[in-house]
Amino acid sequence: MKRKDAIVTIGATVVAGAAAAGAAPVAAAPAEAPRAMRELLDRVVPQLSSQFSLRVLPADPSGEDTFEISGTRGAVELAGTGISALACAFNWYLKHDAGGQITWAGRNLEIGSVLPAPTPVRRTTRFPRCYVFNENVFGYSVPYWDWERWERELDILAINGFNTAMQQIGMEAIWLDLFTEFGYSEAEMLKWIEPPAHQNWQWLGNIQGSLGGVSRELIDRRVAFGRRIIQRMFDLGIEPVFPAFGGFVPSDFGERHPHAPIVPQGEWYGFERPAWLDPTSELFAEMAERFYAHLHARFGLPGGYSVNVLHEGGRAGNVDLPAAGKAIQDAMLRADPQAFWLLLAWQENPRREVVEKLDPTKLLIVDSVADDHGQWLQKDAFWGIPWTWGYINDYGSTTIVEGRLAAIARQLPQTEALSRASRGNLVGVHIYSEGIDHNPVMFDLLTDSVWRAGEVQLDAWLEGYVRRRYGAADPRALAAWRIFARTAYGEPERPEEGGQQSIFNAQPALDAKGASPFIDADWLYDPHEFERGWRALLEAADALHASDGYRFDLCDMTRQVLVNRGRLLLGRIRDAYGRKDRAAFATLTTEFLHRMDQLDGLLGTREEFLLGRWLAYARSWATADAEADRLEYDARTIITTWGPDRKTYDALRDYANRDWNGLMRSFYRDRWARYFASLTTALEQNTEPTAIDWFEHDRAWTLRRDRYPAEPHGDTVASARKIAADLGES
């Protein structure tokens, strides 16, 4: 299903991000794989690039990717069936021979000045699709990234074998182009289009025009930036998937087109949804034709399109769903005969009636959580439609140590899923996480397994993981990871809870259990055992402190220990308040706030945990102060109130909560301090505590424009040691 055709380009200015509106990126031909691979090596290991030689293997008739590694010390040959296989060969060698690692959350490239001799190997994957990116990544993680951060991300995706990825940057221009042809002014559409951190929910058909709109200048900059991303994706063998036209239109579209068969869609968590134009109508066909014409003019022929009708609710009305599904696919294929439609298995979707009349060879279903809770088990392996196996991690891009390592090691598609006769047309794997920068061990395990033929022995795999992540086979670090693998990365009774959230980030209440309104879990693992793992990791600091991966993990695990301690403290605070023990209440609440202060300081030592970096990214896209303020509001809102009013706040507030330096101090700590003060007054006066309007409190923070550090400061190891001494034994 991978695209092999080249795409016409108008000029090389695309690569510089400044092409004319009609320019389109050009796909890299297989013959260009060595050039693209050499450029990748020059970026990620410039000091060692010349020690690699590159060779293209003949394509396998089955379409399976293969790589080979051979050579001697200082002269390593990488061979692969294309750029993706070559990139995976490099990563396999780096991890399993050179003892290095590249992730977005720490890297280890201390592998010497001369490459070690490789273990000759030939490996093949049976999965032509390796997909990455939840649509929500474009709101929770990447909406305002700069080119340096995008370039690093694309290189990481390539070396891990991802050959298909969502791309939404600049997509708003297509809707602007389309609706100004169908009765709307540019000013109306600029107000209707959501700003970047909320925009992807608009293309999902969930929200519209709620957070103040965008400028034409911002759209133009994002279009040029999007083309630059797509060009690099093509160079690295990564096929982009864009939002498709599924019939979502402004909610007042029927007033301007009275004869259009419009189905109002109601609300989504308090937001007014766009209306749905019946895909079986002539007007839909006309609009779809224009939509794809604009898309191809601006971005080329990406080949993959994603739309999920009735996503998380919505109303079908009198629409003939089988005919609607066929009309949506027919419109794609008329515009691009090689297109495929990517559908998400989530909640009720994909609905069988939507796909039953479609060409299954032009579909791809991503089963969002495909382990022993996967929809493929309930929906007859999607009735023969090609699908991918994988997981969601990091809901809302929250900072949680979480995952199910043993489940993935046991159920990986190369083993259990592939061995089942009921697997259907399983063609690939995916990581469908809502966020980036967290839990690199999950990423490493899944992508490593794609090239393995049998079940992963997790304990042995962890030994290799510790060596390559930290640059040494430290027994204390390995002992720590064995504990992490059976606690935070184990198999909780309620895996749908999404990990142990920070109680510090919860809206203050004595009975709070989680920050997100969708979390209602108390303990998913033994926090005392997890803390023993953390102390073992900390004991390795003298040996491993120079490792970037170690310092990230130490920061992250120390963070999790502190928030776990906060949860334990809250229970004691609740008991003291119930007993009306004012002295104990004062002591315990002081300690609770002290732990939050410690956490804020710790988080400031790593760039991955900086509110200042997030806000600086957002402001960097503006051309004037007023626009910078609007973009900062967008960035502040998505991680706190989520929406602009009480109705949306009550439904979604704190869904994307973060343990971040600056956010912990100025937002979460302030909430708890205010809450504890109100309870203290109630104890002193023997009255009920005064109610606090949390929406107004939180909204006021989204309107602030105070600055926070955008660069890390302090030392992670020193901070963790100080915290350990202060905590004492658990």
Image (spheres, grey):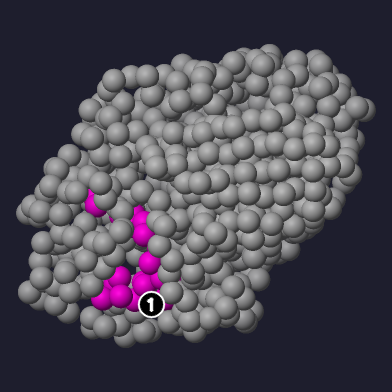
Residue 282, position as x, y percentages in the image:
10, 70
Number of other residues with Cα within 10 Å of mark 1, as a class: few under 14, some 14 to 19, many 20 or more: some
Q: The magenta stretch spans which residues?
A: 290-311
Is the residue 74 above or below the residue 253 in the image? Answer: above
Please tell me whether residue 10 is drawn above or below residue 393 in the rendered image: below
Left or right: residue 119 versus residue 8 is right
How many marks on residues? Answer: 1
User: Residue at horizontal 46%, vertical 50%?
Assistant: 164
Q: Is residue 8 left or right of residue 706?
A: left
Q: 673 and 667: which one is in front? A: 667
Q: Residue furthest front?
A: 58
Determine the image quadrant of residue 324.
Answer: bottom left
The kind of residue on which mark 1 rests is Ala
Whether residue 596 appears in this view of the structure is no
Q: Position of residue 267 (x, y in %)?
A: 27, 54
Determine which residue is flagged by label 1.
297
Q: Nearer the viewer, residue 54 or 287?
A: 54
Q: Judge by depth and name the residue closer to the eye, 569 or 485.
A: 485
Q: Outermost residue toward the right?
A: 542
**Residue 621 occupies which quadrant of the picture?**
bottom right
* The stretch drawn in magenta includes residue 307: yes
Q: In the image, is residue 212 above or below residue 555?
A: below
Kindly identify the residue that appears in the image at 45 percent across and 21 percent down: 415
- Is label 1 in a helix, a strand or a loop? helix
Residue found at x 70% / y 36%? 70
Left or right: residue 355 versus residue 32 is left
Which quarter of the figure is the C terminus placed in? top right
380 vs 254: above or below: above
Residue occupying the point 81% across, 22% down: 473
Query: Residue 460: x, y in percent?
Result: 67, 16
Residue 663 on the magenta segment:
no
